[in-house]
Each structure stands twice: as C-alpha cells, then as structure tokens.
Image: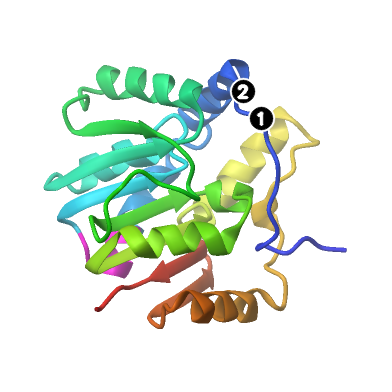
Amino acid sequence: MQKNWTQTRTSTFDEAGARKMNEIAKTVFAPIYPVIARNAMAVTGISKGTCLDLGSGPGMLAMAMAREAPQMEIIAFDFSEASGRIGLENFTEAGLGDRIRTEAGDVHAMPFKDASVDLIVSRGSMFFWTDLKSAFSEIYRILAVGGATYIGGGFGNLELRDQVIAEMLERDPTWDCYAKKKAGADSHRRFTEMFREIGCTEFKIIDDETGFWVVVSKTA
C-alpha cells in the first residue's frame, strides 16, 4: 500500500546523522533551496518581516531565504541540537551569521509569541512531525496577521527533482525518495478537516511539479 503524505515518519538526528544530512544538503540537494525560497515568496507574496524555517536541519533553506529576502530576519528552528550546531557553522562560513539565529525546540510547542512570524517555511520536516494537528495549531498561533506558510516537500521544479533523484540513486540504489510517491487520495480531505478543527479557513494545497506544499494564510 502506498504511504499517505500525511502519515508521519521516524528518523534519528544524532551528530552522525546530522553530519550526513549536512553533506547531502550541501552537495546533491544544494540547487533546490534557492528555487524553493523564491517559490515561497512568489506564492505568499511575503519578503519582509520575520521568516521561520521549521525543521531547518543544517540550515540550507534558511540561508537561501536570507539571500533571496535580504529584508527578512531569519530564524532556523530544529529539535536537533546537533543540527543547530552544524547550522551555525554553515551560517558563519557563508557570512550569514548576523542574518540568521537558531532556536532549538519542538514544533508542537514552540517558544514564540502569538502572531510573531510573517513567513513560515519548511521543506521535508512535516513528514516527521508526530501530530500534524498539534503542529499546525502552533504554526497558526504564531503566524502574524497577513502572514503565510510554505510548508511541505519537493525539489522546486521537475528538472531539479529528476536531477536530485538520479544523483541520489547513483549514490545509493536503495534510497527511498518519498517525493516519488503521490499523495494519498484523501490528503486534501484530511488537511481540510484538520484546518476546520483548528479554525483556519484560509489555506490551499499545492500538489504540482514544485512539490507538495501547504499554504496557510492568516487574515484576521
């Protein structure tokens, strides 16, 4: 049976795992992050204020946002302290240490004030969250009025998707790419029901060549 996009997955992010992710993110996956950052701004229309990268890992998307949106304050948020340390190394190396700050914590109980973040982005981490409803309730709580999210998974466009998948399979023929699997037939319905329970009425699901993305807007 094909897995549903809204089913959570498990993973371990110790120092070794975080270093491995960092190496892949800085090589094979490197071209996708600027494209995803630009897509996020194009879809949401937001390029100023505070941007939060959830499940930031080694910080590649956070750095792409810092470069593509020079007027934004960037926060890289991850539950893994090892990933946070690696992210700091990457930010300093890239000359972005003064543009990005790191926070460690749980997406289900974030240490941010209500209505304090203008743009929330995340690539890949949603599929590891234990409780989507709890996580998106927190996301909606901290989202500022006029703010939006760009949360999901993908490679930015078809060309990059094919390129990354080919390179990863060349490295490891057993590599499991969840992005090759289509969302379950009931994914849209499940998100619709979840957002109704949360009290969020302004949202859309993007499921196209850019990937699978949840765009939540807060208008009041």
- Quadrant containing the N terminus is bottom right
**Mark 1 surroundings within 10 Å by alpha-carbon count, few (fewer than 14), some (14 through 19), many (20 or more):** few
Residue drawn at point x = 41 percent, y = 26 percent = 84
Q: From which residue to which does the magenta span run? A: 40-46
Q: Under tag 1, what secondary structure? A: loop
Residue 12 badge: 1
Task: State if disc 1 and disc 2 touch (CB < 8 Å).
Answer: yes
Q: Under tag 2, what secondary structure? A: helix
Kindly tell me whether residue 124 is visible in this rendering.
no
Spatial CA span between label 2 and label 1? 7 Å
Residue 152 falls within the magenta-colored stretch: no
Badge 2 or badge 1: first in the primary sequence = 1
Decide if residue 141 is on the left or right side of residue 167: left
Which kind of residue does numbered mark 2 sit on?
Gly
Q: Position of residue 172 (x, y in %)?
A: 74, 30
- Quadrant containing the C terminus is bottom left
On the image, which quarter does residue 116 sit in? bottom left
Residue under circle 2?
Answer: 17
Q: Is residue 204 above or below residue 168?
A: below
Which kind of residue does numbered mark 1 sit on?
Thr
Residue 160 badge: none
Q: Position of residue 108 (x, y in %)?
A: 50, 50
Q: Position of residue 33 (x, y in %)?
A: 40, 44
